[in-house]
Image (tube, rainbow, N blue to C red):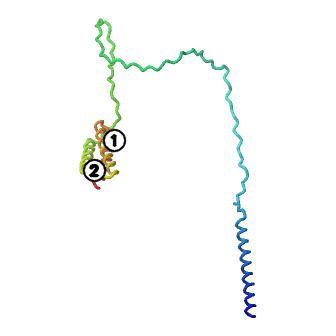
C-alpha cells in the first residue's frame, strides 16, 4: 500500500505543479495581449504669438499721375535680321579749301582691337615647360600597347590623348594656364598607363 499512497501523492504533486505552471503561462500570455500604448509627453502651454505690426500707409499724392494716350499698334511684324554693317572705306580726300580757314584737327579713327583674356605666361619658360610635359606624355603613350589594355585602360589612354590635344590647342591660343593644366593631366594619365 505504501507504493500506492506514494504514487497518489506524486500524481497530486505533479497536477498541482502543472496547474500552477498553466496559471503562470495564462497570466503571462494575457499580459502580452494587453494593448500597449506609448506614454506621451503632455503638450506645454501654447506658444504666445506676437501681434502683427501696425501698417503705415504713405499719404496719397495730391495729383494722380496721368498716363499718355496709348496709340494702337499694328500687329508686330516678324523680327528682321539687321543687315551686316557696311565695310569701312578709307576717307576720300576732300577738295582743298582756302587757306584763310584754319583746318580743324580730325581725330584719328581707332582700329578695332581683338580683345582677349590676359593669359600671358608668368615667365618666358612657361611655354617650354608645357611642351616638355607634352613630349613626356607622348613618349609614355607610345610605349603603351593599346590592344592589350582593359576597357578602363583604353578610356584612360583616350583621355590622355584628348588632354594632350587640348593643351596643344591652348598653346596655339596663348592660354598658358589651361595648357599647363591639360598637359599635366595628360602626363599623369600617360605615366599611370606606362606603369602598368
To which quarter of the image does residue 3 belong? bottom right
Label 2, on which residue? 147
Label 1, on which residue? 178
Residue 95 lies, in percent from the top left, at 29, 7
Looking at the rendering, in which quadrant would you find the C terminus?
A: bottom left
Along the line of sight, which residue is nearer the eye, 28 or 137? Answer: 28
To which quarter of the image does residue 73 belong? top right
Asked if marks 2 and 1 touch (Cβ < 8 Å), the reply is no
Q: Secondary structure at mark 2?
A: helix
- Marks 2, 1: nearer the viewer: 2
The total of numbered circles placed on residues is 2
Left or right of residue 116: residue 54: right
The residue carrying pointer 1 sits among few (fewer than 14), some (14 to 19) or many (20 or more) residues within 10 Å by Cα, namely some
Real-space Cα separation, disc 2 to disc 1, in angstroms: 31 Å
To which quarter of the image does residue 20 belong? bottom right
Lower position in the chain sequence, tag 2 or tag 1: 2
Along the line of sight, which residue is nearer the eye, 95 or 112? Answer: 112
Relative to residue 73, is residue 135 depicted above or below? below
Left or right of residue 3: residue 173: left
Residue visible at 32% across and 18% down in the picture: 88
Residue visible at 34% across and 36% down in the picture: 118
Along the line of sight, which residue is nearer the eye, 179 or 7? Answer: 7
Residue 116 lies, in percent from the top left, at 34, 33
Left or right of residue 34: residue 160: left
Relative to residue 79, is residue 195 depicted above or below? below
The residue carrying pointer 2 sits among few (fewer than 14), some (14 to 19) or many (20 or more) residues within 10 Å by Cα, namely few
Left or right of residue 85: residue 8: right
Residue visible at 74% across and 91% down in the picture: 4
Relative to residue 64, is residue 22 depicted above or below? below
Residue visible at 72% across and 81% down in the picture: 17
Residue 161 lies, in percent from the top left, at 30, 44
Amino acid at each position: 500500500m505504501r507504493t500506492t499512497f506514494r504514487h497518489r501523492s506524486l500524481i497530486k504533486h505533479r497536477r498541482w505543479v502543472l496547474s500552477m505552471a498553466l496559471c503562470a503561462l495564462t497570466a503571462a500570455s494575457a499580459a502580452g495581449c494587453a494593448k500597449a500604448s506609448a506614454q506621451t509627453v503632455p503638450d506645454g502651454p501654447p506658444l504666445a504669438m506676437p501681434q502683427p505690426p501696425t501698417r503705415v500707409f504713405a499719404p496719397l499724392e495730391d495729383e494722380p499721375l496721368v498716363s499718355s494716350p496709348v496709340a494702337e499698334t499694328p500687329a508686330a511684324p516678324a523680327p528682321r535680321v539687321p543687315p551686316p554693317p557696311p565695310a569701312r572705306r578709307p576717307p576720300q580726300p576732300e577738295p582743298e579749301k582756302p587757306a584763310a580757314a584754319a583746318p580743324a584737327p580730325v581725330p584719328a579713327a581707332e582700329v578695332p582691337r581683338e580683345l582677349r583674356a590676359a593669359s600671358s605666361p608668368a615667365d618666358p619658360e612657361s611655354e617650354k615647360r608645357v611642351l616638355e610635359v607634352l613630349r613626356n606624355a607622348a613618349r609614355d603613350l607610345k610605349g603603351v600597347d593599346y590592344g592589350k589594355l582593359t576597357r578602363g585602360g583604353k578610356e584612360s589612354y583616350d583621355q590622355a590623348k584628348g588632354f594632350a590635344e587640348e593643351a596643344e590647342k591652348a598653346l596655339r591660343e596663348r592660354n598658358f594656364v589651361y595648357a599647363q593644366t591639360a598637359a599635366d593631366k595628360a602626363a599623369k594619365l600617360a605615366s599611370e598607363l606606362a606603369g602598368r
